[in-house]
Image (cartoon, rainbow, N blue to C red):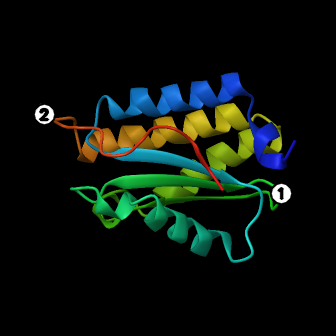
Amino acid sequence: MSKVEIFLTREEEQAVVEAIRLAETATSGEIRVHIEKTTAIDPYERALEVFHQLNMHETQLKNGVLIYVAVKDRAFVICGDQGINTLVPTDFWETTKEIMGAHFKNGNFKQGLIDGITKAGDQLKTYFPYLEGDTNELSNEISKG
């Protein structure tokens, strides 16, 4: 099995997808998780590439959030589109990363992802609350590279 396949069990993946679904019930924002074995470039730059490959930059309100993980590199990045980035406190993504990183250091990847998703969802809900007629613009499934 590759490092991507053993990062989360099938049940853990489903718990992460459910966390995304729950977070998005209160917001028009979109959250995605992308997991891949490694990256040949800077993890942040790779996360931006994936952000565009997943068409996250095309959300109506520019309020997508990507959690990118390069398993072998032991690196992860959280990046938001311009709509959310201009509104959250300047240290928001860094404090979210710290919470996730504490879980990751203990090997609890599922809980780290869920806590990051929940925290991102709370901010999205604050600035982009769910409005009647909102549609889920992007898949909640974990993408893999």
Residue 15 position (above or below residue 84): above
Compared across the picture, whether 26 is left or right of 134 comes to right
Q: Residue furthest top?
A: 11
Q: CB atoms at circles 2 and 1 under 8 Å apart? A: no
Classify residue 84 by image quadrant.
bottom left
Q: Residue furthest right?
A: 1
Type of amino acid at the residue the image marks with label 1: Lys
Residue 108 spot, x, y in % from top left: 76, 34
Compared across the picture, whether 43 is left or right of 96 comes to right
Give me the disc on residue 117. none
Query: Which residue is label 2 attached to?
Result: 133
Residue 41 position (above or below residue 104): below
Query: What residue is rendered at 68% in x and 76% in y?
Result: 42
Give me the disc on residue 72. 1
Query: What residue is rendered at 28% in x and 60% in y?
Result: 62
Residue 17 position (above or below residue 30): above
Q: Of the residues under marks 2 and 1, which one precedes in the sequence?
A: 1
Residue 65 position (above or below residue 8): below
- Tag 2's secondary structure? loop
Circle 1: is it few (<14), some (14-19), or many (20+) Cα within 10 Å?
Answer: some
Please name whichever residue, 43 or 58, is drawn nearer the observer in this view of the structure. Answer: 58
Query: What residue is rendered at 64% in x and 31% in y?
Result: 13
Q: Split into 4 quadrants, where in the image is the N terminus?
A: top right
Please name whichever residue, 121 or 11, is drawn nearer the observer in this view of the structure. Answer: 11
Q: What number of labels is visible?
A: 2
Circle 2: is it few (<14), some (14-19), or many (20+) Cα within 10 Å?
Answer: few
Type of amino acid at the residue the image marks with label 2: Gly
Residue 55 spot, x, y in % from top left: 39, 60
- Tag 1's secondary structure? loop
Query: What residue is rendered at 84% in x and 47% in y?
Result: 2
The residues tagged by marks 2 and 1 sit, at their Cα atoms, a distance apart of 41 Å
